[in-house]
Image (spheres, rainbow, N blue to C red):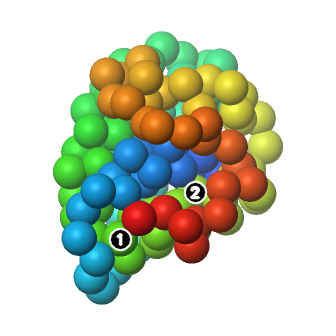
Amino acid sequence: MAGTIKPMFVVLIAVVSIMSVVPEGEAAIGCGTVVSYLNSCFPYVTGTGALGGCCKGIKDLYAAAQTTADRQSVCDCLKDLAASTTGVDLGKAAGLPSQCGLNIPYKIIPSTDCSKVQ
């Protein structure tokens, strides 16, 4: 399961960064929720499958992360998973937002400072 979680969190770093325009509040999104939204992205970012339903998961997670705290929580989860999972193509993961029609005003990388995510 840990191998599945990391790729999804890398993808979510991009998505959380996009959500930086929503008002602040308490984080309501935990790592389990993040994994649930991004589970369909795992085959793609590990090179074992197609994009499939991944974009729906990314867009739904983007919509669910309403507050700064939510977005920072998602970012932290993605970073933790990225650090503990092998086999993820970070280039594919970073490119998911644009492939799914979402625009992010900065480059998404594993070293993103989640405390700066708005």
Q: Residue 64, position in %: x, y?
A: 22, 58
Establish if 115 lies above or below 57: below
Residues packed near mark 2 inside 10 Å, few (<14), some (14 to 19) or many (20 plus):
many
Looking at the image, which residue is at 61% across and 37% down? 107
Where residue 93 sits: x, y (%)?
59, 32
Q: Which residue is labeled 2 in the image?
A: 78
Residue 41 in view here: yes
Determine the secondary structure under disc 1.
Answer: helix
Mark 1 or mark 2: which is in front? 1
Question: Which residue is identified by label 1?
Answer: 68
| 17 relative to 42 in the view: left or right | left
Which of the marked residues, 1 or 2, is nearer the chain's N terminus? 1
Identify the residue at horizontal 42%, vertical 18% (top origin): 99
Quarter of the N terminus within the rendering: bottom right
Mark 1 vs mark 2, CA separation in Å: 15 Å
**On the rendered structure, is 63 left or right of 4?**
left
Element at label 2: helix
Residue in the picture at 57% in, 73% down? 115
Which residue occupies the extreme top position in the image?
50
Report crowding for label 1: few under 14, some 14 to 19, many 20 or more residues within 10 A (C-alpha): many
Q: Is residue 61 visible?
A: no
Q: Amino acid at mark 2?
A: Leu
Task: Look at the picture and state if 50 lies above or below 57.
Answer: above
53 shown above or below 40: above
Task: Give me the disc on residue 16.
Answer: none
Q: Is residue 47 above or below residue 107?
A: above
Dots 1 and 2: beta carbons under 8 Å?
no
* Amino acid type at mark 1: Thr
